[in-house]
Amino acid sequence: MSPRPSRRQTLKQALAAVALTAAPSFVSATTGEVGGTAAARASLDRLFGRRLGGAALDLAPRGVHPWYAVSGKAGKVSITGDSPVALVRGAYAYLRQAGLAHVSWEGDRVDLPARLPDADTGRVTSPFGHRAYLNTCTYGYTTPWWGWARWTREIDWMAAHGVDMPLAMEGQEHVWRALWREFGLTEAELAAYFSGPAFTPWQRMGNIEGYSAPLPSRWIDKKKDLQVRILGRMRSLGMTPILPAFGGYVPKAFAQKHPKARIYRMRPWEGFHETYWLDPADPLFARIAGRFLALYTQTYGAGTYYLADSFNEMLPPINADGADARDAAYGDGVANAAATKAKVEIDPALKAKRLAAYGKAIYDSIRQARPDAVWVMQGWLFGADSHFWDPSAISAYLSLVPDDKLMVLDIGNDRYPDVWKNAKAFGGKPWIYGYVHNYGGSNPVYGDLGYYRRDMTAIASDPDTGKLAGFGMFPEGLHNNSIVYEAAYDLAWSAGQETQAAWLSTYARSRYGRTTPALDAAMDQLVQAAYSSRYWSPRWWKSKAGAYLFFKRPTATIGEFPGHPGDRAQLDAAVRALAAQARAVAGQPLFVLDLVDAVRHLASLEIDDQLQAAVAAYRRGDAAAGDRARRAVEALALSIDALLGVQPETLATWIDDARAYGDTPADAAAYVANAKAQVTIWGGEGNLNDYASKAWQGLYRDFYLPRWSRFLDVLKAAGTGAFDEAVVTRDAIAWERAWVAADTVYRRERPADPVGGVQALIARLDEARKNRNG
């Protein structure tokens, strides 16, 4: 009998099964992109300038673990790695460790000396075969208005952080449009089908159809050209992008044209109208899937990994009474009861059989066009709809797909940490472990650096992870809490080789240019106070979205709010400690940004306390106390809004980017309406309003504050008498929609003295607390 392999041997065997060979140098016939060391050097030039140009770059064969090594003496630096991404990652890690560079969404700090410092890192390996990145939703919450310059920057960010497996979802509407034209849809039907630019991810996943339509054809064409360049750049760096595939959703017009097809009317998602899903057993499914991939390959080239999510927050159609699936087909006009979240009894044998058939047919539809392809699916549904996706259901769904032909992105471990265990490591399929962290691009200051450190170290050495193929960060939106992503991707390469205190000190020195014991202590306080929360639970409270109470649609029930995570007293101390260091590092923009973020988070929590105090006071008839709390809310909100002009992103920049993306006045107006709707009302008649709430300049002053002021006016007038919140809410909804429709011009206003503004805001916080506490 052979001895049981060690944990390290088990992990090595799993990673070896999915290891890739190093990317050779090449020139793309589609884009002219040069690959290999030339691509890595070009990325380094863009990130750090020509001063690093003398570094020697060498590609080496790939082994069991991805790796890089940096050595240098007398100003001569040599970087070796097993992929272009590893070369860029190695260079960045070397520069950051020396305190010479920092790369983030908020901006870079690069200060390379004439003579580069000595180095001898030895071989630095990642315990994860792949480092994945992005979420299908990122393409709605962050990238709708991105052009090539912004994507160039993001791909370089990916390389610097060692990402080699990004989701690449741009440009697919060009293929869908061609596909549905071939299947007989008219231009009018297509115009009614595609949702607006800020909502395309949910269109693609089958949650919505035709919301904020039409999608301008010029947007589709621009994104097609953009995706060609994105894929060329990703591939040149040795990345293996995940591409889209057909998951089964068809236009309503297609369903109407095929009344005998097995097409299910799916549940109305979050208050939108129903969508339509084609049963994979229907012959049309394979035809559509094959043609989509043929058109996609013709347009963008062949890939290996293809994403098809058929049941994102939509339950599979399996009849509760075991009747034939046609009983729930569109042609019969019967709504599918099992596609609701109602708790109905489903025969276990029927459920397993149907799920296994669905999984096999989806894979087969990809295999017919791309025999070597791997079907990729997000595992979010297994946690979000766990009442349906019990271990037996997960096992059945995956059971008939060859083990090496399906990869699961288990994205939600910071919210649903036991999915992979319940799924028994997905039954021998390769899978990626990771975290969503960010929801809707909403940006409270949070994350859990200690949790990531413990959790990622544990997962990398766990003997029961099966074919663990990598780690990933899957944020719904970008441009916030950069420290979380810096920490996570560092762990993906070093798995906790240094203490958190040492890591924080290095982080501060690279990001701010210097650090001191006092600054290190302040950073540690901030981490203990704010970056020790795994999931920001207040963003969803009583079916009301919004990162803070101030960001939620007003309600008189806010006195029942259980409070925010984190240590408020320690956060207050951290903000003051950071502010005390401000004059010494005020010349560093990234420090100022982080300081402003910390104080606006603290002040936003105080606004919530003041709102609770105002509502309680008005309801007990104490108008004077209510007015005092309201004045505090207004003073704090306006002070925060003025400070947030230092942020890279504001309401004005979001709207300006949308407007600039338009090629005609009509397109520009449509994009602006899309942009404003997404960060406020979102859409539908469900609970998505404020889901993508943002702590941005412009929103505090011009959206959140006036919305609450209108509500508090009515509450104050009611006093201890009757208060019909339903009527007030209807008025608020009408006001929100009018705000979205208004052609208002917003301008970023940068504070002249942000550090002085921080000190003034701290003083206002002290005054507000004093008044609230009597």
Image (cartoon, helix red, strand yellow):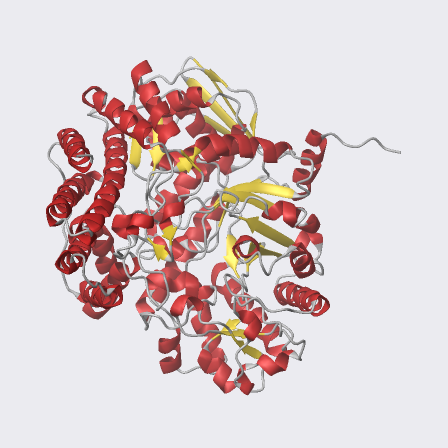
Q: Is residue 441 left or right of residue 575?
A: right
Q: Position of residue 5 (x, y in %)?
A: 77, 32
Q: In the figure, 702 relative to 677: above or below?
A: above
Q: Where residue 37 appears, x then y in whole percent?
A: 48, 36
- Quarter that holds the C terminus: top left
| Residue at image coords 48%, 85% | 256
In terms of image quadrants, where is residue 359?
bottom right
The percent position of residue 274, horizontal first and vertical second, equals 45, 74
| Above or below 510: residue 236 | below
Report the residue at 57% width, 71% height from top: 338
Q: Nearer the viewer, residue 563 or 46?
A: 563
Against 80, residue 535 (above or below) is below
Q: Is residue 493 left or right of residue 568?
A: right
- Left or right of 555, for residue 88: right
Give the quadrant of residue 722.
bottom left
Q: Is residue 403 visible?
A: yes
How many numbered tags mark residues here?
Answer: 0
Q: Can you see residue 45? A: no
Which residue is at 53% across, 30% downward? 454
Q: Residue furthest right?
A: 1
Judging depth in this view, the residue of 163 and 480 nearest the camera is: 480
